[in-house]
Image (tube, rainbow, N blue to C red):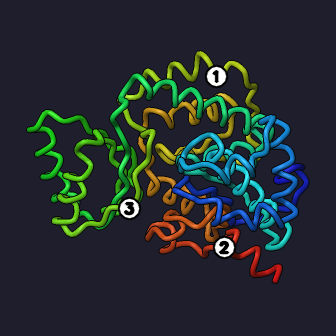
Amino acid sequence: MGMTTETTERQPGTAMVFPGMGPVKFADVGEFLTFNSHARKRLKVADEVLGYSLMDRYRRSADDYDEAAQVAFLTVSSALADWAEESLEVRPVICAGPSFGQRAMAAYSGALSFADTVRLTVRLARCEAEYFATEYEDVVTLTFLRTPRERLDEILAELTERGEYFDFSGYLDRDFYMLSLREPMLDWMRGRISAAGGYSLYTMRPPVHAAAFGKLRRRVEEEVFGEFDFAAPRLPVVADQDGSLVTTAAGLRTMLLDTFDRPVHWERVTRTLREQGVRRICMAGPENIFARLDCTTADFELLSATPERTLRQQA
């Protein structure tokens, strides 16, 4: 499944991209996981690694970002890439995966096996839960858009005057951000964003990609990453923090660690893809904001490999 041989004929100008994780309910992907042959194969591996039924655990989950939800998102994204190769004949020359999409990208590129990527995802989910139970326990990450930077700077100046913590966690597009802040300030922040003409999307708990989480990064490196042997990716990977090309095992390992304490810069990724001659992106994952960002749609032909599309083509 996925890119399995160096002899696969690749398509110049094509990238495989795995989107970051947003809230995805079981009802949104349950039919795909049940009936798609690629999903069933991936589920079988995931169940063997987990020691429990991912479908059952995910169906009962009330947390958008718990262990089961994370593994389910990884499983769906990986299966959709398999489907895109078979049904859309996608043969990329490069890949990217902003935020949580790094996990599926690591498996797709061959840096880790899918089974090891499931293990890594579980270990990281549990490590994060333990860390945020005692550190930054009241911090969340808010995603919002249509907020001019000059107005946002005024809002952040108010937070600074109040002595409140905040960190940028993502720069997704022009006037489109992810910001980590204390949950008690969430309603206040949403009100300020709305007054500035912006729109708040979703809130992530635990928070992600903030400079303050260096201790979590070090803990992950010491307690988790030593269990895994990373290989060099079989095709170039674009790091979501700075848009650099990653071609070595050490570089990919560093990129995965950087996700804990460095913000996502999606515009830098799309700039690198353009510079590498990419004209077509296959977005393999549940439908979410990354497929709709202006910097994604402006310069690229977009192939959407979503659960909905696979089911329509099966009908």
Label 1 vs 2, first from the N-terminus? 1
Marking on residue 205: none
Please state which of the two labelled residues, at mark 3 or mark 2, is closer to the viewer: 3
Determine the CA span between mark 1 and mark 2: 35 Å
Pick the front one: 273 or 302: 302
Horizontal side of residue 127 vs 206, given as left or right: right
Residue at position x 51%, y 73% in the image: 297
Q: Residues within 10 Å of mark 1 (few under 14, many from 20)?
A: some
Disc 3 secondary structure class: strand
Rendering quarter of residue 25: bottom right
Q: Do the numbered discs 3 and 1 sit on residues whose CB atoms are within 8 Å?
A: no
Residue at position x 27%, y 49% in the image: 186
Please state which of the two labelled residues, at mark 3 or mark 1, is closer to the viewer: 3
Residue type at mark 1: give it.
Val
Write down the residue under mark 2.
Answer: 303
Pick the front one: 91 or 176: 176
Label 3 vs 2, first from the N-terminus? 3
Location of the C terminus by quadrant is bottom right
Marking on residue 201: 3
Please state which of the two labelled residues, at mark 1 or mark 2, is closer to the viewer: 1
Residue type at mark 3: give it.
Leu
> Percent position (x, y) of residue 24?
58, 59
Label 3 vs 1, first from the N-terminus? 3
Write down the residue under mark 1.
Answer: 224
Relative vertical location of residue 187 with respect to residue 249 in this rendering, above or below: below
Q: Do the numbered discs 3 and 2 sit on residues whose CB atoms are within 8 Å?
A: no
Disc 2 secondary structure class: strand
